[in-house]
Amino acid sequence: MDATWIWQGPASALGTDVIDYSVEAEDGSLGTVVRLSQTPGFDHLVVDAGVWKFGRSVVVPAGLVTAVDHAARAVKVRCTKDEIKGAPRFERDHDTSDLFYLNRLGTYYESLMAAPSE
Protein backbone atom coordinates (compact mmCIF):
# COMPACT_ATOMS: atom_id res chain seq x y z
CA MET A 1 0.00 0.00 0.00
CA ASP A 2 3.03 2.32 0.32
CA ALA A 3 2.90 3.40 -3.35
CA THR A 4 -0.64 4.64 -2.79
CA TRP A 5 0.42 7.10 -0.10
CA ILE A 6 3.90 8.18 -1.09
CA TRP A 7 4.54 10.95 -3.60
CA GLN A 8 6.83 9.54 -6.28
CA GLY A 9 7.96 12.80 -7.89
CA PRO A 10 10.62 15.33 -6.87
CA ALA A 11 10.43 16.10 -3.16
CA SER A 12 10.23 19.83 -3.81
CA ALA A 13 7.22 19.55 -6.13
CA LEU A 14 4.59 18.45 -3.61
CA GLY A 15 4.97 20.88 -0.74
CA THR A 16 2.67 23.16 1.17
CA ASP A 17 2.87 25.61 -1.72
CA VAL A 18 0.26 23.46 -3.55
CA ILE A 19 -2.46 24.76 -1.23
CA ASP A 20 -5.10 26.50 -3.40
CA TYR A 21 -3.88 24.69 -6.55
CA SER A 22 -6.58 23.19 -8.75
CA VAL A 23 -6.76 19.40 -8.89
CA GLU A 24 -7.26 17.81 -12.29
CA ALA A 25 -8.62 14.27 -12.53
CA GLU A 26 -8.22 12.31 -15.77
CA ASP A 27 -11.64 13.54 -16.89
CA GLY A 28 -11.69 17.13 -15.67
CA SER A 29 -11.45 19.47 -12.73
CA LEU A 30 -11.93 17.94 -9.30
CA GLY A 31 -11.54 20.93 -6.99
CA THR A 32 -8.92 22.82 -5.00
CA VAL A 33 -6.26 21.61 -2.56
CA VAL A 34 -7.16 22.89 0.91
CA ARG A 35 -4.64 20.87 2.90
CA LEU A 36 -1.60 18.70 2.38
CA SER A 37 -0.94 16.13 5.05
CA GLN A 38 2.51 14.65 5.19
CA THR A 39 1.69 12.07 7.85
CA PRO A 40 4.50 9.49 7.63
CA GLY A 41 3.24 6.62 5.50
CA PHE A 42 -0.06 8.35 4.69
CA ASP A 43 0.74 11.50 2.66
CA HIS A 44 -2.42 12.90 1.10
CA LEU A 45 -4.24 15.92 -0.24
CA VAL A 46 -7.55 17.14 1.10
CA VAL A 47 -9.45 18.58 -1.85
CA ASP A 48 -12.47 20.87 -1.63
CA ALA A 49 -14.59 19.45 -4.41
CA GLY A 50 -17.20 22.21 -4.09
CA VAL A 51 -20.52 21.74 -5.81
CA TRP A 52 -19.28 18.67 -7.68
CA LYS A 53 -19.36 16.65 -4.44
CA PHE A 54 -22.25 18.50 -2.83
CA GLY A 55 -19.94 20.74 -0.89
CA ARG A 56 -17.82 17.91 0.48
CA SER A 57 -14.09 17.48 0.54
CA VAL A 58 -12.29 14.36 -0.64
CA VAL A 59 -8.99 12.77 0.34
CA VAL A 60 -6.55 11.85 -2.44
CA PRO A 61 -3.43 9.85 -1.50
CA ALA A 62 -0.17 11.47 -2.67
CA GLY A 63 0.75 8.37 -4.68
CA LEU A 64 -2.04 9.18 -7.14
CA VAL A 65 -0.49 12.52 -8.05
CA THR A 66 1.07 12.27 -11.51
CA ALA A 67 2.29 15.85 -11.91
CA VAL A 68 2.51 19.22 -10.23
CA ASP A 69 2.44 22.18 -12.62
CA HIS A 70 3.51 25.22 -10.62
CA ALA A 71 3.10 27.56 -13.61
CA ALA A 72 -0.55 26.54 -14.03
CA ARG A 73 -1.05 26.09 -10.25
CA ALA A 74 -2.42 22.59 -10.86
CA VAL A 75 -2.00 19.09 -9.46
CA LYS A 76 -2.88 16.19 -11.76
CA VAL A 77 -4.09 12.85 -10.42
CA ARG A 78 -4.47 9.45 -12.08
CA CYS A 79 -8.12 8.81 -11.30
CA THR A 80 -11.42 9.86 -12.75
CA LYS A 81 -13.90 11.95 -10.82
CA ASP A 82 -16.23 8.94 -10.49
CA GLU A 83 -13.42 6.82 -9.05
CA ILE A 84 -12.73 9.50 -6.47
CA LYS A 85 -16.46 9.79 -5.74
CA GLY A 86 -16.49 6.04 -5.06
CA ALA A 87 -13.82 6.28 -2.35
CA PRO A 88 -14.74 5.88 1.32
CA ARG A 89 -16.39 9.11 2.33
CA PHE A 90 -14.37 11.78 4.14
CA GLU A 91 -16.58 13.13 6.92
CA ARG A 92 -14.49 15.02 9.46
CA ASP A 93 -11.01 16.51 9.65
CA HIS A 94 -9.93 13.93 12.21
CA ASP A 95 -10.64 11.18 9.63
CA THR A 96 -7.29 12.08 8.09
CA SER A 97 -5.55 10.83 11.23
CA ASP A 98 -7.83 7.80 11.76
CA LEU A 99 -5.79 4.74 10.72
CA PHE A 100 -8.93 2.65 10.15
CA TYR A 101 -10.27 5.23 7.67
CA LEU A 102 -6.87 5.69 6.00
CA ASN A 103 -6.43 1.93 5.61
CA ARG A 104 -9.88 1.58 4.00
CA LEU A 105 -9.10 4.50 1.70
CA GLY A 106 -5.71 3.02 0.82
CA THR A 107 -7.24 -0.38 0.04
CA TYR A 108 -9.79 1.28 -2.26
CA TYR A 109 -7.22 3.31 -4.20
CA GLU A 110 -4.75 0.42 -4.28
CA SER A 111 -7.41 -1.69 -6.02
CA LEU A 112 -7.76 1.03 -8.68
CA MET A 113 -4.01 1.21 -9.21
CA ALA A 114 -3.82 -2.58 -9.59
CA ALA A 115 -6.74 -2.79 -12.04
CA PRO A 116 -5.71 -3.33 -15.67
CA SER A 117 -6.20 -0.27 -17.86
CA GLU A 118 -8.50 -0.51 -20.83
Image: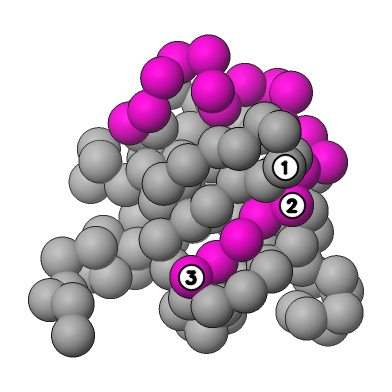
Look at discs 1 and 2 and give the one toward the viewer. 1
Q: Position of residue 43 (x, y in %)?
A: 48, 33
Q: Is residue 118 left or right of residue 100?
A: left
- Residue at image coords 75%, 79%: 53
Give the x, y percent position of residue 36: 66, 33
Q: Residue 46 colored magenta? A: no
Judge whether 90 appears above or below 52 on screen.
above
Numbered badge on residue 22? 2
Mark 1 secondary-structure assignment? loop
Report whether residue 111 is seen: yes
The quadrant of the picture occupied by the C terminus is: bottom left
Q: Who comes first in sequence, dot 1 or dot 2? A: 2
**Is 73 situated left or right of 68 in this image?**
right
| Label 2 crowd (10 A; few <14 / some 14-19 / many >=20) | many
Residue type for callout 2 = Ser
* In-front residue for pair 13/44: 13
Query: What residue is rendered at 61% in x and 37% in y?
Result: 69
Residues in magenta, as a range: 8-26
Q: Is residue 93 visible?
A: no
Residue, disc 3: 26
* Sooner in the amino-acid sequence: mark 1 or mark 3: 3
Where disc 3 sits, the SS reads loop
Q: Position of residue 32 (x, y in %)?
A: 78, 53
Residue at (71%, 33%) from the top-left corner?
71
Residue type at tag 3: Glu
The span from disc 3 to disc 2 (Cα, nearest Å) is 13 Å
Residue at 23 percent of width and 69 percent of height: 111
Tell me, for residue 72, which label it has, or none. 1
Helix, strand or loop at mark 2: strand
